[in-house]
Image: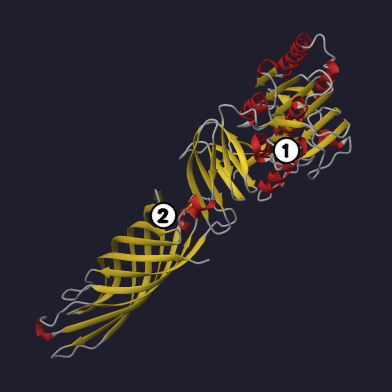
Amino acid sequence: MTPRARGTHWLARLTGLFLVASLTLVASAAVANERFALVVGANIGDADDTPLAFAERDASRMADVLTRFGGVPPENLLLLLGPDGASLGRAIDAFAGRIADTTPTRDPGGNVIFIYFSGHADAQALHLKGTRFAFRDLKARVARLAAEVSVFIVDACRSGGLVRIKGATPAEPFEIKADDQLLSEGLVIITSSSENEDAQESERLGGGVFTHHLITGLVGAADTSGDQRVTLSEAYRYAYTQTLNATSVTAVVQHPTFSFDLQGERELVLTRMENSAGFGRLRLAAAGHYIVFERFGGHDVAADLDAVADTELVLSPGSYLVRRRESSAVRELEVQVRPDDRTTVVLADLVRIPFRHVVRKGYGQAERSAFSLGADLDVTGAVLPDTGAFVLVAVAAQLDLADLAIRLRLRYGQDVGDNSSAPLGLVVSQSLFGLDLGLFKLFDLGPHGLGFGLRGGIDWLAQRFETRGDAPDRDQLVGRIGSLVRAEFALAPTVALTLDAGAEAWLMEVARPDGSALEARVVPIVSLGFGVLLP
């Protein structure tokens, strides 16, 4: 994950959650509550605010969830993307008129208003295209709407300052009795971070961290009771825990905060999964950490969650890639989600990804490297005239990192040539013992890999001569360096076969009639090896 600070994005989302809950509730003995939602996303804040990448996208996603599953009729939703302060004020006033026209004969206090903002903000105001819209003004305008429940969700850096003055603090999950009746009234404020924290957005998730998890919870992941409803406490519990886990590996841990001024003890139902006609359901049978990509081979993340057993997500029909991350493995499966149908993913169906691909693609959670042991068989060309090729065996240890594979080898071998017919009856036998280090860059091609690398080392070369004349034995250190092309084949998730081909330059001392000289001899080389992952 490559998170970056973002503005008011998170608090707006949690507020949306509470408001949706309120909107979903129906009074059993009175007129049904009317649900309304004002959803605002702003990538551009003040001149000194870093532009955001996903605030407006997250606002659109939240609006979609509220209208599809949160009981907000499309005509009761106002979505604003990139407004300035003046246009936001006018929009709220016009929205108030729409609410008055929609419920002229009803008690206006029975309405539920959901206010969601994603963008830049501080404890006093929203930052909108170089303008400021004070929270005091926003609250006053919303108060004139005379709703029974008003829910503010603000997703922004240091947005916890908005609730600090009321004594709110980062809060762990809570329990409220669930009920379909709206027997609570008042104000709810939820922020994505505490007073001194940066809210974060993620390139990998394609959105704000908190908002992503809140939306994932609203479409089913937070439904721990299995009643096809996501309540306020379920959604907050899920979003709080997932955000805390996701940001615990970053520079700043993000703690969502809340402030409630509600009367009554009844729970608010935010979304209802039975309102999913035309959608499909993805059931994750086994508990664990999953990432669900919207398109097979694509990069759009539909959900990133720690799921309990039998978690269900409501998704648009289409192809998805389900990836499960474990402490020592990553598994994948392509699935097809069909409308009005349930697709179940069981652990046995998931295919384990080769361990080196897990590291190179960054699929691991805590693991950023993999260590394996193996062996190689090398064959080189002849180093000296009238001598044979070398055949060598090596033991190897390899460290796979995200960008490089590092292979350390200890090798021994002999030449296998027959030079008994050499002039003067000179017979040469050669053996060597050496150490080398290779660096390889690989690119994945399906389950396999192809790349290139450099390898350098030093050998102790022993030459023994048999002749009718005088030919003393010769021992020397030989330095070598070469470039190689590598193909990697995944035989199993924990076993890989490698094939290297290239050339090496040997820097060695060569005997001449007038003495010896240091020369570089270029020889071809082919290596066949394998590696086994260590637990």
Residue type at mark 2?
Answer: Lys
Question: In the drawing, does residue 319 fall left or right of residue 393?
Answer: right
Q: How is the image coloured?
A: secondary structure
Q: Nearer the viewer, mark 2 or mark 1?
A: 1
Which corner quadrant holds the N terminus?
top right
Question: In the drawing, does residue 209 fall left or right of residue 163?
Answer: left
Q: Nearer the viewer, residue 408 or 291?
A: 291
Q: Nearer the viewer, residue 313 or 520?
A: 313
Instruction: Decide: few, some or many residues near mark 1? Use Cα within 10 Å; few <14, some 14-19, many ≥20.
Output: many
Find residue 305 and report its horizontal and vertical position in percent.
63, 44
Find residue 250 and report its horizontal and vertical position in percent.
66, 48
Is residue 123 in view?
Answer: no
Label 2 with label 1: CB-CB less than 8 Å = no
Residue type at mark 1?
Answer: Ala
Find residue 45 and report its horizontal and vertical position in percent.
69, 27
The residue under the point 78% across, 22% down is 113
Q: Which mark is residue 299?
A: none
Question: In the drawing, does residue 397 fall left or right of residue 376?
Answer: right
- Could you say which quadrant of the image residue 131 lies in? top right
Instruction: Decide: few, some or many residues near mark 2? Use Cα within 10 Å; few <14, some 14-19, many ≥20.
Output: many
The residue under the point 72% across, 21% down is 38
Q: Is residue 74 above or below residue 381?
A: above
Spatial separation of the CA atoms under disc 2 and disc 1:
44 Å
Find residue 39 and report its horizontal and vertical position in percent.
70, 23
Q: Nearer the viewer, residue 511 or 288?
A: 288
Q: Which mark is residue 235?
A: 1
Give the residue furthest to the front: 29
Q: Nearer the viewer, residue 450 or 319?
A: 319
Q: Secondary structure at mark 1?
A: helix
The residue under the point 56% across, 44% down is 291
Q: Is residue 261 above or below residue 356?
A: above
Q: Which mark is residue 441?
A: 2
